[in-house]
Image (cartoon, rainbow, N blue to C red):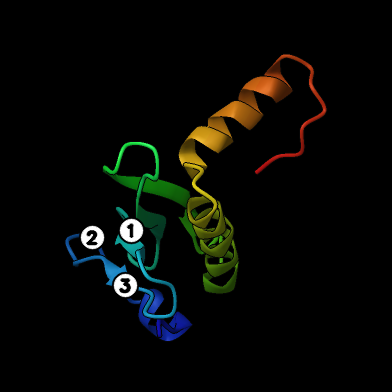
Amino acid sequence: MLKTVKANKIKPGDAPLPDGAIGGLRLMPGKVKGKGAWELRFTSPGTGKRRDMGLGTYPAVSIADARVKANEALSLVANQRDPIEERRRVRSAEAMGGGVPAF
């Protein structure tokens, strides 16, 4: 399981750090030591293709928060919904003035 100490040591050029607790969740190295981007890899239920979904940047999005976001996205996949498409749908509805809660 990924710990804060290890995440803080990530540097440019390093391999992505897998979370270990959530399948497909990993921390991609950023341009500065100790910073990175959360990415969730999953298979789209609609197309069967692999997708990579951004979940925010580290350390602004903590390990615990990234796990929560990943679990929410994976629950959509389990219900045969693509979380990237769902996020686009929600953002589109919000831009049009709809009162749909953010993903």
Callout 3 crowding tier (Cα within 10 Å): few <14, some 14–19, many ≥20: some
Residue identified by numbered label 1:
32
Callout 1 crowding tier (Cα within 10 Å): few <14, some 14–19, many ≥20: few
Sequence-first tag of 3 and 2: 2
Say which residue appears at 50% left-offset and 58% top-offset: 74
**Mark 2 residue type:** Pro
Q: Report, in whole angstroms, how far the alpha carbon at label 1 lies from the one at label 2.
A: 6 Å
Q: Position of residue 98 (x, y in %)?
A: 79, 21
Q: Nearer the viewer, mark 1 or mark 3?
A: 3
| Quadrant assignment, res 2 | bottom left
Circle 1/circle 2 CB separation < 8 Å: yes
Q: Judge by depth and name the residue closer to the eye, 37 or 96.
A: 96
Say which residue appears at 33% left-offset and 76% top-offset: 9
Say which residue appears at 37% left-offset and 70% top-offset: 23
| Quadrant assignment, res 87 | top right
**Mark 3 residue type:** Pro
Q: Is residue 24 above or below residue 7?
A: above
Residue identified by numbered label 2:
12
Sequence-first tag of 1 and 3: 3
Q: Position of residue 82 (x, y in %)?
A: 47, 42
Residue identified by numbered label 3:
18
Q: Position of residue 69 (x, y in %)?
A: 57, 59
Q: Is residue 102 above or below residue 36?
A: above
